Image (spheres, rainbow, N blue to C red):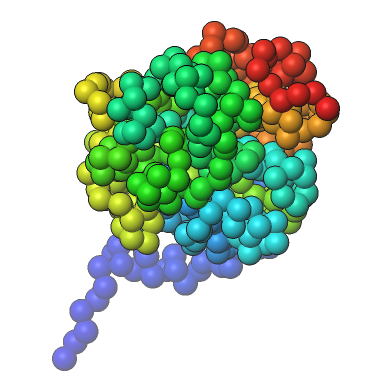
Amino acid sequence: MSVPRPKRHERRRAKALSTTTTPSPQRRRVLSASVAGALMTLIDPALRAGAWAAGSDAPEKTEVKVGFIPLTDCASVVIASVMEFDKKYGIKIVPSKEASWAAVRDKLVNGELDAAHVLYGLIYGVHLGIGGPKKDMAVLATLNNNGQAITLSNQLRDKAAIDGASLKKLIDREKREYVFAQTFPTGTHAMWIYYWLAANGIHPLNDVKSIVVPPPQMVANMRVGNMDGFCVGEPWNNRAIFDKIGFTAITTQDIWKDHPEKVLGTSAEFVQKNPNTSRAMIAAVLEASRFIDTMSNRKKVAGIIADKSYVNCPIEIIDQRLEGKYDNGIGRTWDDPNYMKFYNEGAVNFPYLSDGMWFLTQHRRWGLLKEDPDYLAVAKQVNQIELYKQAAAAVKAPVPKEPVRSAKLVDGVVWDGKDPKAYAAGFKLRATPV
């Protein structure tokens, strides 16, 4: 049986293969360089801009334990983990539910937590050795603006004290001790309630008593009469309304529109040892923040964080204010354009130097700092602006041109960061100078 002769094109291909030689070493180097160059064009320019330490963006630590307190604004940390935005950046965020801000502070200081969803002022307090042990600290990014509130008890409502002015009249008239709770001495909630009381002529240290209560315990403590009012993050203000024990006197966005609130905080030591891991955490949280700020995603977000592993609160209580739908519990309802924001085209997350400095001015105002620090120098030490910019470039998040911003607060006083010492000293109501 004769074997069919190969067709002409098959004979040519066989001949070509039989005469092919292995490329020379020089030729191989040229080919490799060509392939590498082609691959590099596919990588985001921000990732090949030479910003990464030691020429690599590989995280030094791939699993990070991030603490959080059961509050609506822990959402970006939880969502970054649950929806695996962290995986994209080579890390695994392990959320760790904590009982109090004091516990978060202690675990950040001793290294039990790598980072945390944490009060802005707590980080600055630790950095300067007030409100606990002294340790150099770092703010990686701001997690949210707005979304806290001051709740007053129904007993105050029954006495016609429903806002700052009427509360002032009641306190002046009744010489009993009124008690107001906040969540940590150097934290945001302490500063918001102190500011609001003082703006209404009530000295928060002399005219009333201030106590510290962890956020999830606020409603239970008000129910049994341990305080007349409190400042805390959501959903606990809304929970007080649902449980018919209190009402919202003012939201914090009405004290300061788009105010800084929680941050992604860690120790300076952690950043120094793990710059790439820190950058990856920022990037993952930015991705999660962008997801949360798409309003159509908020019901899903509320459903995730409502779980007992996280906030442990009914979905509808979380979701209502998360979507900006407010009911103050005494007859007013409104859609608030200044609801809790997590991204806002990157404006939320940038660690403005002026934001950190503001908390220092209030620490000085209320005697937590016995003398004026170098406000700007401290803010530059704590707020990791360059690291943040690198992460923002990787996720294509806009970055503001300037590291300071200005705002007019509820008392009409403008904060612009230009003269923090004069600002701190300029308030009529403040702690007695030491």
- Which corner quadrant of the image does residue 292 belong to? top left
* Residue at (77, 45) in percent of width and height: 129
The answer to whether residue 134 is left or right of residue 211 is: right
Residue 263 at what x, y percent from top left?
Answer: 56, 40
Q: Nearer the viewer, residue 304 or 231?
A: 231
Residue 114 at what x, y percent from top left?
Answer: 62, 58
Q: Residue furthest bottom?
A: 1
- Which corner quadrant of the image does residue 225 belong to? top left
* Residue at (59, 10) in percent of width and height: 413
Residue 49 at what x, y percent from top left?
Answer: 64, 38
Q: Nearer the viewer, residue 293 or 246?
A: 246
Does residue 404 lie above or below 300 as drawn? above
Q: Nearer the viewer, residue 298 or 239?
A: 239
Residue 397 at what x, y percent from top left?
Answer: 49, 32
* Residue at (72, 19) in percent of width and height: 424
Q: Residue furthest left?
A: 1
